[in-house]
Image (tube, helix red, strand yellow):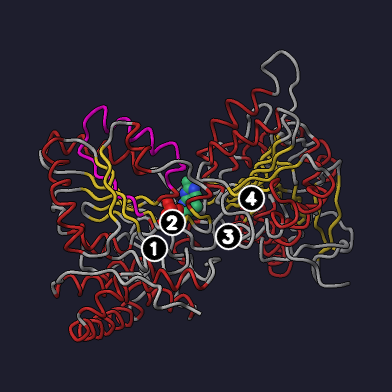
Amino acid sequence: MIDTARAHRPPVAKIGDEDLERLLLIRHFELTLLKLFEQGALNGTTHTCLGQEHIPVALSALLREEDFVFSNHRGHGHFLARYADPHGLLAEIMGREGALCGGVGGSQHIYHERFLSTGVQGESLPVAVGVALRLKRTTPGALACAYIGDGTFGEGAVYEALNMAQLWRAPLLVVVENNGIAQSTPTSAQMSGTIAARAEAFGVRHHRIATVDLAHIRDEMGPLVAAVRQTSAPLVAEFVTRRIGPHSKGDDARPEQERLQAELNGWHRAYGEAFPERFARIDARQRELVARVAAEVAARPAVTRGRA
Amino acid sequence: MSRAERISDNLNRALHQVMEDDPSVHVLGEDIVDPYGGAFKITKGLSTRYGSRVRSTPLSEGGIVGVGAGLALAGDKAIVEIMFGDFAGLAFDQLLNFASKSTMMYGRRVEIPLVVRCPTGGGRGYGPTHSQSLQKHFIGIPGLSVFEMSPFHDARELLPHLLSLGEPCLLFEDKVLYTRRTYRGGEVDDLFVFDLVGPPPYTARVRLDDGSPPDCTLIAPGGVAHRALSAMRALLLEDEITCQLLVPARLYPFDPGPLLPLLGGTRHVCVAEESTAGGTWGGEVAHHLHRHLWDSLPRPVSVVCSAPDVVPTALHLERDVLVQDTAIRQAVLEALA
Ligand SMILES: Cc1ncc(C[n+]2csc(CCOP(=O)(O)OP(=O)(O)O)c2C)c(N)n1
């Protein structure tokens, strides 16, 4: 039994239609993927960002076209918050014509304009430092933004990157989606100390945000992101969040109570209850949109591979 | 005969057995404790029974292989699971420059009973960084032995054998095998039988029931065994070419000795592996056979590999890249044409 009264509904300020549209586009995209898997229409694997959609949606407003975004295995939200191309992404995941990367990369290996994801945890951070150093030279004011999970702090490459970023003043924004779990292992069982103290050890500025309120996130992050641009100093922005879906599919070993609690504390309920009519209208629209995208992409022929 | 066990269950029982039999055995890996029991569930039940000897680790492949080596150096035995064998790249330094070297570089033999298990290979649509066959990158390192699980070998014998060697071992386990069943009792299917030859950990020999000498010999590691079997069947039924298939559990160091008597009279030897071509295990096997059988082999050993490419995610593209039964059959037909 879930104790609804105990669940904390986070307060949220006003939200524009565009933001709600983006949040719900990602939500329906991810739900559709899980459904397609269940139906056997997809193979391989996927990691949905259910519950964490607000982070890239909030940040996308603070990023510029010339910024470079590095994403990870849980990257659909990172992508869709930046590029409104659910067709291309779904085609990539389904191996259909119009796929972003020819069906080769799939869900977790995407390189599109200034967005790159890869499936080996931690690997992208030193690469992001390299990209940031070039941006600093060629496009002053631009930054490299790298999304990583709390679990990825187990990898040594993260520390090598933080050290070099601070040492060489790389305009690097590390966005940590601290969802309290890595696959099945709670953060407490795999991280000693804190992310803040780890950043501090390298002299890297750290900021922690626990709200799901987009306006609040932007207010807090705006000046910090501007500082990364202006002073070429790296920043670790740690978002406290909760995964409300499985790690990949059907592999959630957490008690249902815990998952439900996370759902009740999330942005979906907060905005749904704060702006019921607008939310319902946009929700229905985005559900239909994604259903249409899924039907269209599924009807496309399999992508063929042009080999050089 | 009762229904054979799944290879994943065979591996799981083997792990339970070595932990039961030897209290010095420790198991480390990402997400391996219950109730999750590992990404492929091979470690299920271990933490419930053996408590702190089974550890879910941070995402630190280099670190946990180093910790395993340390436990082993100091008198324990360690088994480390790399969630996807691809990430063994992150542990390469620990294996190359510490674990394997340390057995020899201090002027005397130092025992390091460490087994690193690598779920490996494609065919499941996991994409370029979760589908590779990295065996070849670990071939030729003195002090590092490389093994591969097969449907013919019993992990309950294989795992204790590896732990008894006192040196670091890699055990590759093709992920497509996990859901398949083991072959036991010498029976494969309606056409083929098998036996285990040579010293432990054995080479499986699959052949026609009638004992006639085969036209051709296929050699493949465990993960490619089903594709080799399928090629053998087609070659027999459609091309009237008889084959035997040899599946060694030990890939490196490779001892051709026990296989040589089985190769007399064979018109062709074809090695099939899933890695990309170039510096491969198959090349190593071919080299040994050329040296020993130069005078009697009618033609060079052929090596069939996957395409020189990344492993795409989309299943139809993945199929085009990974070595298939059809490629093995084609190589044999071309050689014997
Ligand atoms: C080097 C490496 N090790 C292991 C994995 C398998 N893996 C994929 S995601 C994941 C958990 C990552 O946790 P976290 O960084 O907290 O991100 P989250 O999944 O919670 O978003 C693991 C172990 C991997 N992809 N790369």
Looking at the image, which residue is at 72% across and 28% down?
B74
Kindly identify which residue carries mark 4: B272
- What is the x, y in percent for residue B20? 82, 50
How far, Cα to Cα, is label 2 from label 3? 42 Å
Amino acid type, callout 4: Ala
Q: CB under 8 Å between callouts 1 and 2?
A: yes
Query: Dot 2, crowdedness within 10 Å: few (<14), some or many (≥20)?
Result: some
How far, Cα to Cα, is label 1 from label 2? 7 Å
Point out the tag, 3 or 4, that comes first from the N-terminus: 4
**Which chain does tag 3 point to?**
B
Horizontal side of A128 relative to A138 (left or right) equals right
Kindly identify which residue carries mark 3: B324
Kindly identify which residue carries mark 2: A180
Mark carried by residue A242: 1
- What is the x, y in percent for residue B88? 55, 42
Q: Quadrant of the C terminus of chain B?
A: bottom right
Amino acid type, callout 2: Gly
**Which chain does tag 4 point to?**
B
Q: Quadrant of the N terminus of chain B?
A: bottom right
Helix, strand or loop status at disc 2: loop
Helix, strand or loop status at disc 3: loop
**Which chain does tag 1 point to?**
A
Helix, strand or loop status at disc 1: loop
Helix, strand or loop status at disc 4: strand
How far, Cα to Cα, is label 3 from label 4? 9 Å
Magenta region: which residues? A152-177
Looking at the image, which residue is at 14% across and 43% down?
A142
B171 relative to A41, above or below: above
How far, Cα to Cα, is label 1 from label 3? 42 Å
Mark carried by residue B44: none
Do the residues marked 2 and 3 share a common chain? Answer: no
